[in-house]
Image (cartoon, rainbow, N blue to C red):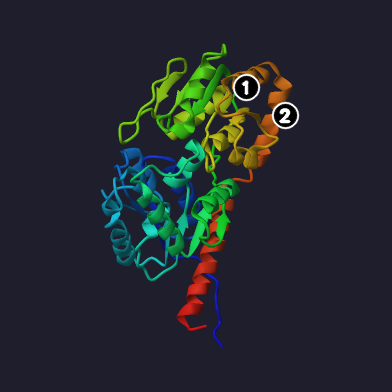
Amino acid sequence: MLQLITRQPRRMLMTLDAVGGVWRYAMDLAMALAQQGVEIIFAGFGPQPNQAQCREAQAIGVLLWSDLPLDWTSESAEDLRDVPRAIAQMARQYGVDLVHLNLPTQAAGLAVDCPVVAVSHSCVTTWFAWVRGQGLPSGWDWHFDLNRHGLMTADAIVTPSQAQADLLARCYGPIGPIAVVHNAVRDDDHQMPTQRQNAVIAAGRWWDEGKNAATLDAVAARIDLPVLAAGSCRSPQGDCFTFTHARELGELAGGQVRALLRTSQIFVSPSIYEPFGLAALEAAHAGTPMVLADIPTYRELWDGAALFALPHDPDGFAEAIARLATDARLRRRLVARARVRARGFTPERQAAAMLALYGGLMTRAQLNTHGG
């Protein structure tokens, strides 16, 4: 009789990019996995990482990089033709026993002899559906086709929230079970400041329409507190946003953003589209009271632990900020609730959930190999 042993990967390949939140996700998850004995091979695509990013990744595992593009920076599916081949070559070169993809399109056409997990952090199809309430523009159908192909090809699909899983199912139809594994951030700094500056902090890629920079700027014109906007205002493709009332800080290192969160009075996020929202989680860890857009993801994660305003209602945001700024008891109550909630979103819990998923896939592959 065949004896099945549920096991974790010995060595796994994880794709990533250096442009957005996937980098932070990959680093925190990979560090927690490495602490459980998993060897990590990072396979990067798109714009090159900076030196600090390279050092961070190399302290955890092996960092490989390809100049092949990301799906959301590409003009056609043809631009991505060589991506699965490159992933398969790296997987064979390092003898990995599991592949973790942070872009499901990378699974389309991928031929490897091990389980494949596709994590859907975001995609063009769900972005247009939620941000603009419409389907893809003419000529963009290949995004839908390639992403659905990848989702159907992968052995498991993961999303960071139930809200995003529901949106994914709504946009793509039957694609199989979707596992929800919440994102996490590492809370290494437990020191709370004795005094906070009278400022509102926001963080995001402000060139992305889904982050709703226009509402944030309108809020800044309506309140007395300065609004600090951390994050890039120009995309790799040249899309940009210029703040008129909020103070643009530009792209900052993670430690700088966390320092601002610890010393600012209020965190605000007017995002229309957030599959998870790592900045809000970092604000909760920092003990910074939050005013969030009233969208399904934020309600799922932070209901009862933050104040909410409709995404396109700058007056509503301004009123909520004023309420927090003048009510110390309310701030303390929301901070306490948010910090309790945040303790459930740790890299260790995330890694445990992913290891359970990986183990189930590897057991199934073992059974299939032996003809069970």
Q: Pinpoint residue 63: horizontal percent, then vertical percent.
A: 33, 52
Neighbour class for label 1 at 10 Å: few (<14), some, many (≥20)? some
Q: Pinpoint residue 111: horizontal percent, then vertical percent.
A: 35, 67
Numbered disc total? 2
Which amino acid, by three-letter code, is at mark 2?
Arg
Q: Which mark is first along the chain, 2 or 1? A: 1
Report, in whole angstroms, how far the alpha carbon at label 1 lies from the one at label 2.
20 Å
Q: Which of 293 and 93 is in front in this view?
A: 293
Residue 232 versus residue 44 in the image, above or below: above
Q: Pinpoint residue 64: horizontal percent, then vertical percent.
A: 30, 53
Question: Residue 316: which disc?
Answer: 1
Residue 106 as seen in the image, left or right of residue 364: left
The residue sitting at 73% across, 22% down in the picture is 329
Q: Nearer the viewer, residue 330 or 293?
A: 293
Neighbour class for label 2 at 10 Å: few (<14), some, many (≥20)? some
Residue that label 2 marks:
333
The residue sitting at 51% across, 26% down in the picture is 202
Q: Is mark 1 on a helix, strand or loop?
A: helix
Quadrant position of residue 61: bottom left
Question: Residue 357: which disc?
Answer: none
Residue 250 versus residue 47 in the image, above or below: above
Which amino acid, by three-letter code, is at mark 1?
Gly
Q: Can residue 351 be seen in this view?
A: yes
The residue sitting at 52% across, 13% down in the picture is 221
